[in-house]
Amino acid sequence: MKRFNLSDWALHHRSFVWFLLIISLLAGSLSYARLGREEDPNFTIKVMVIGAAMPGASIDDTLKQVTTRIETKLEELDELYFTRSVTMPGQSVVYVELLPTTPGSEVPQVWKRVREMMSDIRPDFPQEFLGFQFNDDFGDVYGNIYAFTADGFSPRELRDQVETIRKRVSALDAAGKTELLGEQKEQIFLEFSPARLAALGLNQQQVMQSLAQQNAIAPSGVIEAGPERVLVRVGGQFDDASAIAAVNLRVGERFFNVTDVATVTRGYEDPPQSLFRYNGEPAIGLQIGMRDGENILEFGKELDALMAEIAADLPIGIEMAKFADQPHVVEEAVGHFITALIEAVVIVLAVSFVSLGFRAGFVVTLTIPLVLAITFVIMELYGITLQRISLGALIIALGLLVDDAMIAIETMISRLELGESLGKAASYAWTSIAFPMLSGTLVTVAGFIPIGLNNSAAGEFTFSLFVVIAVSLTVSWFVAVLFAPLLGVAFLKENLGHHEPKPGWLRRQFHRLLLMAMRFRWTTVVLTFLVFMVSLYGMRFVEQQFFPSSDRTEVLVDINERQNASIAKTRADMDKLEAALKGDDDVLFWTSYVGQGAPRFVLSLDVPTAGPQMGQLVIQTPDLAARDRVKAKLRDLAENDFAGVDITIKNLEIGPPVGKPVQYRVSAPNVDEARDAARGLATVLSEESRLREITLDWNEPARVVRLEVDQDQARQLGVTSQDIADALSAVYSGTTVTQLRDDIFLVDVIARGEAADRQSLDSIRNLQLAVPDGRRIPLTSLVALEYGTEQPMILQRDGLPTVSVKAGIGTADQPATLVNALADRVEAYRQTLPSSVTIEIGGTVESSAESQEPIAQVVPVMLLIMAVLVMMQMQSFRLSLIVFAAAPLGLIGVVAVLVPFGVPMGFVAILGILALIGILIRNSIILVHEIQELLHKGRSQWQAVYEASDSRARPILLTAAAASLALIPISRQVFWGPMAFSMMGGIIAGTVITLLFVPALYCVVMGVKPPTDDDEAETVAEPA
């Protein structure tokens, strides 16, 4: 029975196969047009933020009664990786970080369980506890953000305008979440004068109670009047600050106007919780997200059209500016990659035409758009977008996917030279080389398995690399055995003469090297092994990297004041920084954030915990050179003019966010131990001249005034600690009396002391307390004032006080290099600490290790799959050993490239090195299979090894040239550069290894003896 031959079947069903080819090209074109566009692939931010409040509590009470309870309960969560918390007096923020191995699809259910767990422990909290706030949208990205500034309009009027615009934007079909940024809450202030209250003998609490009762909404009943119901309403609610100021009150026997004891003003939250500014001007931002699955470029066009219409209708004095434009960034990024892809295609075409001739090169060329078209269809089916990773994968695959077509056409040409017909020559590839090609293709795909099965955040980020390469390479095999024979019959000549009758100079030199390697087989094997060992040693000189900095042109500036700094101090320092940006030609525009971080306009942005002591600047520059100049100027300014302020100037990141590159975490059972040990570690780090901006994320204590109450005397007077706390809060922080209902907004009415009283400690000494019998007594008669310090902020990790010591790098060194250089000194310092104090490496080195660990776990699976595929093809232990021996030797080329060029080896480069294993095994499979085929045809062992190496040299060299040269366009890019250099070096070295080392190793393992001189002369003459 005749065995099935797919190539022969295609030739007997030409019309149908041509139909499939045309349909594939059309479908691929449509899919390409419909594929989503992104700058970077999405990955799940596996972080939830739990906020909790217990107003009035000290930091110790908040830590023990709130933060600790939350962290202890979260320990029961199976998916928990660790918790980190920020505790401030009366406020707790707990970050729940899930294991990197948690599937993204399961994260929403985990967050639901976290909410249920917090609900379970809610009764365990003190009665003063106000409750939880949950933010599981921590990773939401707002790709389009607009800033609105106003001249001649109040913040309230500007907010109303922006809110109207937000509603119009939300009506767009592709619009996702929309939020305002930086709007200031309106408030009405009743600023009481304690002196005037005392003079009139009035109680502030009674005044506040009267106002609240008048403004209350309360049911007034319904009159059942026969056939109808009549609603009853009681008026008197306030509609403005003037209505409050006009109120006449009676307290006891006294009648008075509110303005007799308080100044009534309408204003904005004071002090503000946060501020947003555009180019130094107060602004309100409009953050616009996009629905999942929508096309960012199409949405961008739709949004731009709407906003252009809105801008034309804005009142004079209101200006609109777009400062986050993800559609534009994506269009540029994808455009650059498409250009690189076209360059790679041209390079591969040039290799094909030069090496195979016009007709054969043309046939190979036609397979490229066909493979890409089918790949685009499958990408659309699986929801894979065009972005940095998937486009890079296509470029990497380009040089590999032509391999099968080249081998198939080469095989066809060799049969035509023997005088076979076009049809017979075209179908010969299936019977001779198709299955070794399939095994080689599957082995190459298996080399990328560590990417596909890597369940870390970095693995999720690069997952599309595995899918695209696996799909394109598998498709390339089908194209080589199904479509390439048909194309060959259509475009090749039957009397095609391809090879020169005599070998050229290069081929003759290769013959000499090959024969030398085979004759001195042991020397070749040993020498290769020694070179490999040298390359292993050379790896210590290759710098390690996680992900490189982004090639975007923004500059990020983080400002962190002392933990007890007011927002006024932070704003003043931000003003100084912004003043330096004005008039700078290297700056297009900037946005500043006081009391909060920038919104997540790109997924890899590290969003800090909000607080009055912090701020952030995002500066847009025209190009990378300008970006570097702005960073240098700001760094000089920070060093000279901002003593005591932690200012970090950095680029955006690619991949999972890390922050400062060099970090250590110091944990201890108590705050003092952790803080003291961290200070000592900072001193150790300061000895390393390559580090700069060494900071502790929390450190300085804050001043505190404690009032010790004489409880016996207080009870005699009918005064409680609660009364004293309320009276002080009413003066300093303010107390919400009621709320004014203004359209869709609520305006708090705040009772507080006058400005002079709020800002002075003397108010405590001058405060008069009202006692139940109507008398007023000085507060100092009941309390004693004590001055001290306490921590304004405590950070914990997994329930232990933890201080992070962070540092930037002032040289071109990679973080891993510096951490290794510091290892001995840090360990020596750790030995001086109590055993209860731990020091852990954080930052880039930790993130890199976390991402590489899943790779290491998957590598055995990769090797097992490769071993099964090789064994299935070879059916021999010794032949499989020969094939596998070549796999790790690509490291020779990798080190030879990375060390002299100073290219770091990061996460992506490691993936490229693993992929090299598959590429080298593929070449070895095809070579060893050819040797076995020649043995079956009656060749001697020596002749078989020599002829197979000679005949396979051309396609292997062509594939190496195509694969390595196709990487040139992406070798210039920040992200792909290390991987491109690694693979180019490995492929070039691997080619030499395959053509010289594998034949020599075959001779050693299979016991092939060199022939006599006459036999050798005959062997050399035969292939010519």
Image (cartoon, helix red, strand yellow):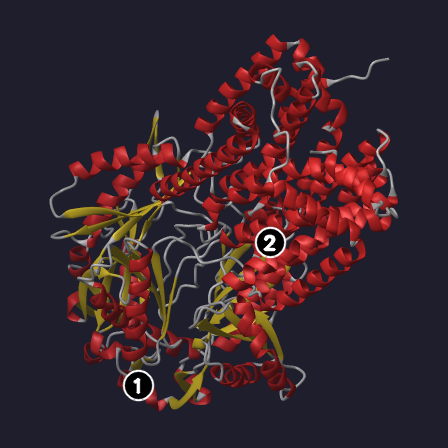
Q: CA distance from mark 1 to mark 2?
A: 49 Å
Within 10 angstroms of label 2, few (less than 14), some, or many (20 or more) residues? many
Residue at 60 percent across and 43 percent down: it is: 506
Indicate left or right for 196 with 729 as reference: left
| Viewer-proximal residue among 151 and 415 | 415
Which residue is disc 2 drawn over? 114
Q: Can you say whether 263 is above or below 781 in the image?
A: above
Residue at 38 percent across and 77 percent down: it is: 562
Indicate left or right for 215 with 720 as reference: left
Per the image, label 1 sits on a secondary structure element best described as: strand
Percent coordinates x, y for residue 806 in the rendering? 48, 73
Within 10 angstroms of label 1, few (less than 14), some, or many (20 or more) residues? some
Q: Can you say whether 702 is above or below 303 in the image?
A: below
Position of the N terminus, as image quadrant, is: top right
Q: Can you say whether 43 is above or below 811 in the image?
A: above
Percent coordinates x, y for residue 684 in the rendering? 52, 84
Percent coordinates x, y for residue 67 in the rendering? 55, 68
Q: Can you say whether 338 is above or below 968 in the image?
A: above
Mark 1 or mark 2: which comes first in sequence? 2
Per the image, label 2 sits on a secondary structure element best described as: helix
| Residue found at the very far front of the displayed protein | 1014
Nearest to the eye among marks 1 and 2: give it. 2
Q: Amino acid at mark 2?
A: Val
Which residue is disc 1 drawn over? 777
- Report which quarter residue 738 is drawn in: bottom left
Percent coordinates x, y for residue 539 in the rendering? 62, 65
Position of the C terminus, as image quadrant, is: top right
- Report which quarter residue 946 is drawn in: top right
| Viewer-proximal residue among 118 and 740 | 118
| Viewer-proximal residue among 925 and 353 | 353
Residue at 81 percent across and 45 percent down: it is: 1013
